[in-house]
């Protein structure tokens, strides 16, 4: 009888220890979240620096990783806990039945948004109609393709009416400045 | 940000082209959501508090930008920020963008929004 009680007590202690230790390890595991080094990730910087995640009992590390395919692959492999996905990437992930879900959107454009089609300060391009035949540098992403398409549509034009130069990164302001000033391009989508 | 350097002027904005354009979101794998729902909830609670913090203390919040982005403080203080909601975006905005993607040949067919999103971990 005493032996049975002792055995039960030992089992209880071991079980409690296992539950306790696994609880500790989950709570102390640092969540790895991707960030873009861009202004648009301000909420991530604020949550980290102002201790907003710490107050919720979690530790978060921001990791730099670019390219949606790389980010999805890293998440599926367990190298990161969460990552960025633009809407187009999310729809494609859905189309391919990739088991990921967007749990929160990181904001939207508004009347004060300054991302768009930029021209040189002294440029004679003053309206969307003036874009006909112009060299427009863009990243080649779905975002710039959509913005250009919708902008050109307003004056009855499409991508065939402009000279698109793809590959410029949206967040590389210094390159944009150099490209406009050198007259290498007429417009930058950034 | 480009305008801040004095190099350019804005001809037309993303919002002029597609009002309320939704840029990007944060995703988790379905496996992770099942395995660690409490961590995801805690993460999102902190994130939404950050949205609120930015609205209430924008100037203070902006001061963190140089550390992470490398932009000068002067630029960081003036650059336009996105409008942060509560982590959700209207379904019609998402479908409107999807329709444009299909029109320009980026997306071959319609994908239901509920297939790509799960807002159940967000605070009410």
Image (spheres, coloured by chain):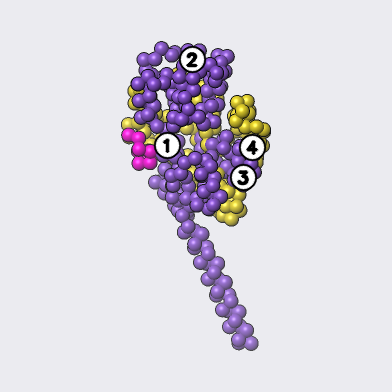
Chain colours: A purple, B yellow
Query: Is A144 left or right of A123, judged from the image as shown?
Result: right
Between the C-alphas of marks 1 and 4, the distance is 26 Å
Q: Secondary structure at mark 2?
A: loop
Callout in the foreground (2, 4): 2
State which region is magenta. B64-72
Q: Report the quarter where the N terminus of chain A lies.
A: bottom right
Residue in view at x 44 percent, y 40 percent: A36
Between the C-alphas of marks 2 and 4, the distance is 37 Å
Query: Could you classify mark 2 by the number of other residues whose Cα lies within 10 Å: few (under 14), some (14-19), or many (20 or more)?
Result: some
Callout in the foreground (1, 3): 3
Please provide percent x and percent y for residue A115: 45, 27
Q: Which residue is mark 1?
A: A38
Please provide percent x and percent y for residue A97: 64, 43
Please provide percent x and percent y for residue B49: 48, 43
Q: Which residue is mark 4?
A: B113
Q: Are marks 4 and 3 in contact (CB under 8 Å)?
A: no
Q: Which residue is mark 3?
A: A98
Q: Which residue is mark 2?
A: A133
Query: Could you classify mark 1 by the number of other residues whose Cα lies within 10 Å: few (under 14), some (14-19), or many (20 or more)?
Result: some
Quick one: B121 or B104, which is closer to the camera?
B104
Between the C-alphas of marks 2 and 3, the distance is 40 Å
Q: Earlier in the sequence, mark 2 or mark 3?
A: 3
Callout in the foreground (2, 3): 2
């Amino acid at each position: 009888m005493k032996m049975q009680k002792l055995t039960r007590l030992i089992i209880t202690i071991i079980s409690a220890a296992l539950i306790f230790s696994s609880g500790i390890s989950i709570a102390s595991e640092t969540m790895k979240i991707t960030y873009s080094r861009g202004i648009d990730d301000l909420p991530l910087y604020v949550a980290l620096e102002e201790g907003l995640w710490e107050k919720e009992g979690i530790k978060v590390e921001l990791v730099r990783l670019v390219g949606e395919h790389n980010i999805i692959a890293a998440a599926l492999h367990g190298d990161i806990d969460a990552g960025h996905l633009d809407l187009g990437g999310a729809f494609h992930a859905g189309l391919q039945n990739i088991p990921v879900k967007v749990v929160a959107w990181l904001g939207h454009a508004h009347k004060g948004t300054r991302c768009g089609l930029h021209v040189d300060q002294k440029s004679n391009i003053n309206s969307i109609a003036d874009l006909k035949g112009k060299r427009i540098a863009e990243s080649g992403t779905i975002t710039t393709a959509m913005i250009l398409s919708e902008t050109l549509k307003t004056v009855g034009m499409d991508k065939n009416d402009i000279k698109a130069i793809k590959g410029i990164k949206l967040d590389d302001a210094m390159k944009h400045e150099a490209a406009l000033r050198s007259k290498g391009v007429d417009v930058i989508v950034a | 940000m480009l305008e801040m350097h004095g190099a350019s002027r804005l001809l037309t904005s993303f919002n002029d082209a597609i009002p309320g354009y939704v840029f990007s979101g944060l995703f988790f794998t379905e496996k992770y959501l099942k395995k660690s729902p409490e961590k995801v909830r805690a993460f999102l609670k902190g994130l939404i508090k950050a949205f609120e913090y930015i609205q209430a203390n924008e100037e203070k919040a902006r001061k963190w930008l140089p550390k992470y982005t490398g932009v000068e403080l002067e630029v960081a203080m003036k650059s336009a920020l996105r409008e942060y909601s509560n982590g959700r975006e209207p379904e019609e905005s998402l479908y409107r963008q999807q329709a444009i993607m299909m029109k320009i040949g980026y997306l071959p067919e319609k994908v239901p929004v509920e297939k790509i999103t799960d807002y159940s971990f967000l605070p009410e």
